[in-house]
Image (cartoon, rainbow, N blue to C red):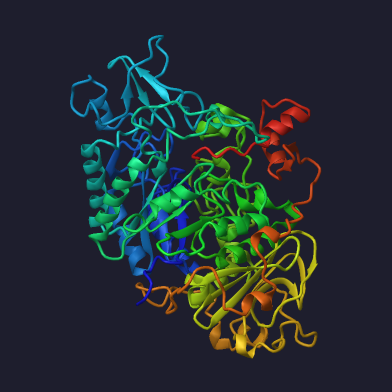
Amino acid sequence: MTDPWWKGAAVYQIYPRSFADANGDGVGDLRGITAHLDHVASLGVDAIWISPFYTSPMRDFGYDVADYCDVDPTFGTLADFDALVARAHALGLKVITDQVWSHTSDQHAWFRQSRQRRDGDRHDWYVWADAKQDGSPPNNWQSVFGGPAWTWDARRQQYYLHTFLREQPQLNVRNPAVQEALLAVGRFWLERGVDGFRLDAINHAMGSAALTDNPPAPPSNRPRTRSFDFQLKQHSQDQPDMLPFVERIRALTDEYPDRFTVAEIGGEESDWVRKDYTAPRRLDTAYGFDFLYAEQLTPALVRAALAQWPGAAGEGWPSWAFENHDAPRAVSRWALPEHRDAFARAKMVLLAGLRGNIFLYQGEELGLTQVAVPFELLQDPEAIANWPLTLSRDGARTPMPWQAEGAGHGFTAGTPWLPFGADHGALAVDAQEADAGSLLHWTRRLLALRRAHAALRVGTIAFVDLGPGVVAFERASGDERLLCVVNLTPEPRALALPDGVTLVASGVSGASFEGYGALLALRAPAEAAAGPAPGWGDEEAPVASSTTAPADAGAQLGDAPASRMPPATGLRPTPEHAGGEGRETSSTTAPADAGAELGGVSASRVPLATGLRRSPGWSELGGRSSPLAQNVVDADPTAGTGADATADATALAAPRA
């Protein structure tokens, strides 16, 4: 039995406004996406996830839906969408669409009807409640974007709930009629050929029926930039009453072959929620914010995140992302400018090696940096409302640079809706295509390895202790074992490596790892592992330290057979690629002798990473520092001076937590 196509898949997220503009109005569109799908397919990903393109007043740029079953004119037409799906399928790419089912726009026909009167059409399709005796909101729930989660409506003489913007009223998903309407939306898109859904903020879709107050959050040294941060969300999200509807969503997608569902699950303690949402007969996978808002990438963080999914019987399947349209660019968040090139390669090695599905955000394959968008050019309503205390999401939503030259960098013939980063032209697709040593080619190489090796795609994972600041783990499937080693510090490391054959390496020579050096290696079978393999730590045949390799790199990188190395570019072998012949047969345990051979230890014994070095302009906040701080302050035309202003600007809030 083969695994489903999505298990271990690499998914590429496209934010339509910023991917490619075909009509020159400065905003990306569906025809622009279709015109650039060859680039996406050449990366070696399995699917694309497209952020909302539905009819919307764009108060939250598409996450406020006014018509679930049509395309906003900004992005094109339903015919354009059908053409996109056809082209993607011809290239062997699956198409995942965003479904925003916890709330709509206040311009949706459902809400317009619901707000007319208390006994009118769809009067109970949204969460309405009477004011308290003193006229205050029904409870103390707070909006993710700041302020009370309730807005008074004079027509009904009631408050309506909105977890996000006031223009995003909360659907009453407890109502069976609402559930039927949402399932009909899903069926509409499944009939048009989509291969699955990403369910936005799905654990926010249902609060407690009693509208019980949330308790206050305990004291913390973390910054609280929004009123939302002062509460534990015990009653406003993560309700078990939601799970029967989750099962109905799964039943719908099961009516169509090979469909896929992934939930976005936010929250401070989302582990058990993700497990509930991905239990048998529920969703295929879920991702949380383990990495998306982390201020440092450390071995302890990686271990803690992966340890949540040990592969127990009946357990769901995890998904991981380092970047997305809501989160700051990882290369800016986790590395200083002088280390970003090396770090970007190491980060990609780590992502390619993780057990679970992996998500790449558009431009991540280029190493795009976070853009410090000036206040006067901000579009993000959350950032405008909380300036400068939260980092704008706009900085990760800037347009994709396709060409190094020209004002529009191949994204548009007009004026882009957000500015490009000053360094984004040098990182453009055409510039990196012409450079065999670029991060773009490196990414293709790693994704090709992930597709070629069942151990990377669906295998078990066992962590290895190789010293401070280094994350290392073994992936195994059947007789195949691969080792991933990443130095997560800018300092060099000399490591005692086990035997094996290097498949790819960056910043590695023999057993010496430069700052942010990383490798993937094929381990020798346990019974043959009596000594080092040629090229592993042998001074006469050192492991390649360059970031790319020619087509016959298998022979040059540790004398592995060239045939074992997948091509650096190209599409997947068939549109129905099943993800390798291997199938995981156990939890995260590696072969019996691997722990001793690799020096495996329990997660509790892992030494912490040394962390990033500070530089002038970094700021302290609760004992942590962020390389984004200086850019944020510089971009603020109204910011004060001095340490207080700088410290305030470092807060990295998660607006869709």
Figure label count: 0
- Residue found 41% across the figure and 78% down from its top: 573
User: In the rendered image of this protein, does residue 345 appear above or below residue 373?
Assistant: below
Residue 152 or residue 599, whichever sits in front: 599
User: In the rendered image of this protein, does residue 484 appear above or below residue 196?
Assistant: below
- Quarter of the image for residue 372 reads top right
- Residue found 56% across the figure and 82% down from its top: 565
Residue 412 position in % (x across, y down):
48, 49
On screen, residue 176 versus residue 405, left or right, reads: left
On screen, residue 396 versus residue 276, left or right, reads: right
- Quarter of the image for residue 404 reads bottom right
- Residue found 23% across the figure and 20% down from its top: 116
Residue 411 position in % (x across, y down):
50, 51
Quadrant that contains the N terminus: bottom left
Residue 576 or residue 410, whichever sits in front: 576
- Quarter of the image for residue 173 reads top left
Residue furthest toward the top?
Answer: 134
On screen, residue 608 versus residue 3, left or right, reads: right
Residue 60 position in % (x across, y down):
43, 36
User: In the rendered image of this protein, does residue 87 appear above or below residue 275?
Assistant: below
Q: Is residue 412 visible?
A: no
Residue 287 position in % (x across, y down):
47, 53
